[in-house]
Image: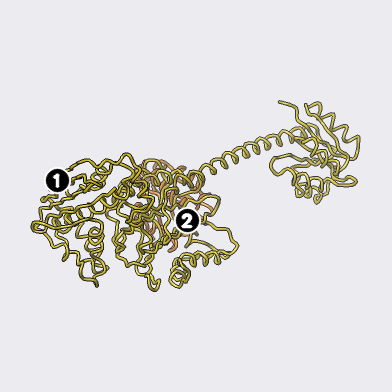
Chain colours: A yellow, B orange
C-alpha cells in the first residue's frame, strides 16, 4: 500500500503532534494547518487523501473549512473526520451537516481512529469504482448517439410536406423516426419506440433502420418489411426488450395508406379541409421482437384518404406527459388540440400545448411527433432532374444491349409470388438508371397487380368508393388469393436498343377472361375519387400502353433516351 | 414502490404497490424467483399499482419466460382502467390472461 497523505488541522500544537505521530506510525505522510483558512490552502496545495479537522479555531472554524473543501472536491471523495473535545449533540450533528463524514471525541482511542480510517478507505474505493463506471457509461451513451444520428437516420427523406418533432427526455431518445421512398414513390414511414434509452435503444434501432431502408428502396411490401424487422429483433433483443411501432405506407396515388400499428397510440388521419379526425387506426398487434409468431398480414389495414389529408403519428410520451400535479396530458386533450390547430402543421400546436402542460416539470418520457400532408410535394417528382440527367450521361456502366426475360407464374405459385423486385433488379444494371428503375418498377407493378386483381381474382374496383368498401376490397383480395388454385400470369420483358437509347417492351398476359381497364379503373369518371390514379400515371410514364386479346393482354413500351 | 408476495396453495400472488417502473426490477425479480418450486400459478396484482411504463411490460415478459420454463401460468389481475389501457394498446391480452 503506497503511503497516503493526511492533513491535520488544529490550533493546538500538542494535538497536532500527537495525531501526527500516530499517523506516521501507520505509514501516513502528514501536513499541518493551524486554522480553517490554512486548511483550505493546504488542501489546494497538497491534495491530501484524508483530513482531520478540529472545530474551534481562530480566523476560520472547522465547519466553514469543511463546507469549502467539500464544495471544491465534488468529483472525488476526500474524507473529513472531525476530532473534537465538544460533546454537545448539536455541535456533533453540525459536523456531519457541514459535510464532514465522521467525528471522534477527544481524547480518543487510537485503534478506533485507525478503524475509522480503514472504513473511509473502503468508501473511497467504492467512489473510485463508481466514477469509472460513470465514465464508461458516458462513453457508451456518446457512441449510441453517434450511431443513432448517423447510421439510423442518415438515409431518411425529408420533403417539405413532412414535419417531425423529436424531444428526448434525457440525453438520447428511445424513439426513432424512419422515412423512405419505394421505387414507385410511395412514402414509407416507421415510428418506433424502444424499451430503454441510449445504447439499449440504439442496439435495436441499427438493424431496424438497415432493414427498413434497404427493403423499402427495393420495393418490398409492407408485410415483408415488418416480418423481417420482427424476426431480426426477436433474434437479437433479450427477453423484456421490444419495439412498439407504427408503420405507414402513403401510396404514390395519394388515395390510400397501408398501415399497421403495433403497440403505439392511435394513428390519426385529419381531414385536409377542416382538420377533423376522419380515421383512426388502433394498435392491433404486439410490439416487435416479442414473438416469432408475428403475421403483419393480418393486421395491415388499407385506409382511404384524399389529397390534402394529414397523417399524424406520435408515441406515448406525448399523451403521458405529466404536470406538477401529476395529471397526464391525455389523448382526448391532444386530439382536441390537433383538431383546433392553426399552425402550418397541427403537431406544432399539439406539442406547444404539451409544453405548457408540463411547464417546468421534468419530461418523463421521450416525445415524438410526425405529420405528413398528403399532397404532391410529399413525394418525389417523376421528371428527371438536371442532376439525374448528368448522372445518366456520365455513367459508363449503362448497358442498353438487347435483353429479354420470360417469366410465368401459375396456380398456387400466384399466392406467394411477388416477382416484381427481382425482375426490376435484373433489368436495372447500373446506378445511373435510378429514375428509369423507379418508373419501370411502378409500371410493371401496376400492370401485374391489375392482371392479378382483375384478371385472375375478378375483383371490382368500384368497391373502393366508400371507406368501408375500401377495406372490404382488400379483405376479399386476401381471401380469394389464399384460395387460388389455377390460372397464370405470363410476363415477357424485352430491351431493344434504339439509335439514341432503348425501348423496354413489357408484355403481361393473364389467364382470365379479360377486363376493360378503363371501366375497371373508372378513369373517365372524375367523381370517383379512389380509382384510376394508378393507371393514369402509367399512361404518362409509358410511350405507349395497349390492351389486346380479350383485354387479358397488356403491352407497354417504356422509352429510355440518352 | 413496495412488493407484497403471498403464496396460497400453489398460487403465488405478487402485489405491486405504487409505481411499477425501471427501478422495480430487482425487487420484482426476487419476488418471483424466490417462490417455492411447487408454485404453478403466478398472479400479478395491480389493484394498488399507480403507474406502469414500458420497462414494466418488459419485466412481465421476463416473468412469463420464467414461469413457462416451470410449466406454470401467469395472470395479470385487477388493473386500474389507465393500466388496462396500456395492456390493451400493447396487445398484452394476446400474451397474458387479464382478470378483474
Q: Which residue is mark 2?
A: B52
- In the foreground, A510 or A431: A431
Q: Is residue A10 visible?
A: yes
Residue A111: x %, y % from top left: 77, 31
Tell whether A197 sits left or right of A97: left
Label number found at residue A227: none
Q: Which residue is mark 1?
A: A408
Tell whether A454 sits left or right of A342: left
Q: Secondary structure at mark 2?
A: strand
Cα gap from disc 1 to disc 2, whole angstroms: 54 Å
Question: Do the residues under discs 1 and 2 have CB atoms within 8 angstroms?
Answer: no
Q: Residue most toward the front?
A: A499
Image quadrant where residue A515 sits: bottom left
Tell whether A314 sits left or right of A256: right
Residue A390: x %, y % from top left: 37, 47
Q: Secondary structure at mark 1?
A: strand
- In the foreground, A421 or A505: A505
Tell whether A519 sits left or right of A274: left
- Dot 2 crowding, Cα within 10 Å, few <14, some 14–19, many 20+: some
Count of numbered circles on the image: 2
Residue B69: x %, y % from top left: 36, 41
Amino acid at each position: 500500500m503506497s503511503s497516503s497523505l493526511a492533513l491535520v488541522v488544529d490550533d493546538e500544537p500538542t494535538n497536532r503532534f500527537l495525531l501526527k505521530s500516530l499517523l506516521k506510525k501507520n505509514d501516513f505522510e502528514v501536513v499541518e494547518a493551524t486554522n480553517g483558512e490554512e486548511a483550505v490552502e493546504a488542501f489546494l496545495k497538497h491534495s491530501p487523501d484524508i483530513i482531520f479537522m478540529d472545530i474551534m479555531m481562530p480566523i476560520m472554524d472547522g465547519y466553514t473549512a469543511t463546507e469549502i473543501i467539500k464544495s471544491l472536491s465534488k468529483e472525488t471523495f476526500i474524507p473529513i473526520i472531525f476530532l473534537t473535545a465538544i460533546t454537545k449533540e448539536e455541535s456533533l450533528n453540525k459536523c456531519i451537516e457541514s459535510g464532514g463524514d465522521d467525528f471522534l471525541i477527544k481524547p480518543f482511542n487510537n485503534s478506533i481512529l485507525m478503524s475509522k480510517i480503514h472504513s473511509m478507505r473502503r468508501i473511497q474505493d467504492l467512489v473510485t469504482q463508481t466514477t469509472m463506471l460513470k465514465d464508461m457509461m458516458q462513453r457508451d451513451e456518446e457512441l449510441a448517439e453517434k450511431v443513432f444520428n448517423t447510421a439510423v437516420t442518415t438515409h431518411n427523406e425529408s420533403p417539405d410536406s413532412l414535419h417531425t418533432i423529436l424531444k428526448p427526455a434525457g440525453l438520447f431518445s428511445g424513439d426513432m423516426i424512419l422515412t423512405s421512398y419505394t421505387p414507385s414513390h410511395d412514402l414509407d414511414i416507421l415510428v418506433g419506440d424502444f424499451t430503454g434509452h441510449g445504447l439499449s435503444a440504439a442496439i435495436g434501432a441499427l438493424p431496424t433502420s438497415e432493414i427498413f431502408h434497404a427493403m423499402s428502396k427495393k420495393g418490398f411490401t409492407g408485410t415483408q418489411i415488418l416480418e423481417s424487422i420482427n424476426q431480426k429483433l426477436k433474434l437479437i433483443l433479450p427477453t423484456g426488450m421490444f419495439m412498439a411501432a407504427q408503420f405507414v405506407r402513403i401510396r404514390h396515388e395519394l388515395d390510400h395508406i397501408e398501415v399497421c400499428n403495433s403497440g403505439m397510440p392511435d394513428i390519426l388521419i385529419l381531414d385536409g379541409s377542416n382538420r377533423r379526425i376522419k380515421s383512426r387506426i388502433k394498435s392491433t398487434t404486439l410490439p416487435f421482437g416479442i414473438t416469432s409468431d408475428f403475421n403483419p398480414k393480418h393486421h395491415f389495414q388499407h385506409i382511404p384518404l384524399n389529397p390534402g389529408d394529414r397523417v399524424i403519428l406520435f408515441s406515448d410520451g406525448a399523451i403521458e406527459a405529466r404536470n406538477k400535479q401529476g395529471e397526464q396530458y391525455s389523448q382526448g386533450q391532444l386530439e382536441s388540440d390537433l383538431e383546433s390547430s392553426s399552425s402550418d402543421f397541427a403537431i406544432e400546436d399539439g406539442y406547444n400545448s404539451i409544453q405548457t402542460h408540463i411547464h417546468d416539470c421534468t419530461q418523463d418520457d421521450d416525445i415524438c411527433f410526425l405529420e405528413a400532408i398528403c399532397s404532391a410535394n410529399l413525394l418525389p417528382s417523376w421528371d428527371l432532374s438536371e442532376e439525374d440527367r448528368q448522372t445518366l450521361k456520365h455513367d459508363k456502366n449503362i448497358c442498353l444491349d438487347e435483353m429479354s426475360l420470360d417469366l410465368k407464374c401459375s396456380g398456387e405459385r400466384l399466392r406467394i409470388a411477388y416477382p416484381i423486385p427481382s425482375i426490376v433488379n435484373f433489368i436495372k444494371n447500373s446506378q445511373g438508371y435510378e429514375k428509369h428503375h423507379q418508373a419501370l418498377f411502378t409500371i410493371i407493378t401496376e400492370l401485374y397487380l391489375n392482371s392479378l386483381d382483375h384478371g385472375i381474382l375478378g375483383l371490382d374496383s368500384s368497391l373502393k368508393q366508400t371507406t368501408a368498401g375500401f377495406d372490404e376490397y382488400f379483405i376479399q383480395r386476401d381471401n380469394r388469393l389464399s384460395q387460388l388454385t389455377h390460372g397464370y400470369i405470363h410476363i415477357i420483358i424485352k430491351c431493344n436498343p434504339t439509335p439514341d437509347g432503348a425501348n423496354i417492351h413489357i408484355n403481361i398476359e393473364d389467364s382470365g377472361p379479360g377486363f376493360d381497364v378503363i371501366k375497371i379503373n373508372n378513369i373517365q369518371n372524375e367523381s370517383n375519387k379512389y380509382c384510376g390514379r394508378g393507371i393514369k400515371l402509367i399512361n404518362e410514364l409509358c410511350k405507349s400502353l395497349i390492351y389486346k386479346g380479350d383485354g387479358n393482354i397488356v403491352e407497354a413500351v417504356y422509352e429510355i433516351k440518352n | 414502490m413496495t412488493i407484497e408476495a403471498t403464496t396460497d396453495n400453489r398460487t403465488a400472488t405478487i402485489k405491486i404497490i405504487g409505481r411499477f417502473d425501471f427501478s422495480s426490477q430487482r425487487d420484482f425479480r426476487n419476488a418471483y424467483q424466490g417462490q417455492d418450486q411447487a408454485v404453478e400459478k403466478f398472479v400479478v396484482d395491480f389493484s394498488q399499482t399507480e403507474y406502469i411504463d414500458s420497462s414494466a411490460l418488459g419485466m412481465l415478459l421476463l416473468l412469463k419466460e420464467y414461469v413457462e420454463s416451470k410449466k406454470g401460468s401467469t395472470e395479470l389481475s385487477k388493473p386500474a382502467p389507465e393500466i388496462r389501457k396500456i395492456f390493451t394498446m400493447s396487445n398484452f391480452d394476446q400474451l397474458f390472461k387479464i382478470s378483474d
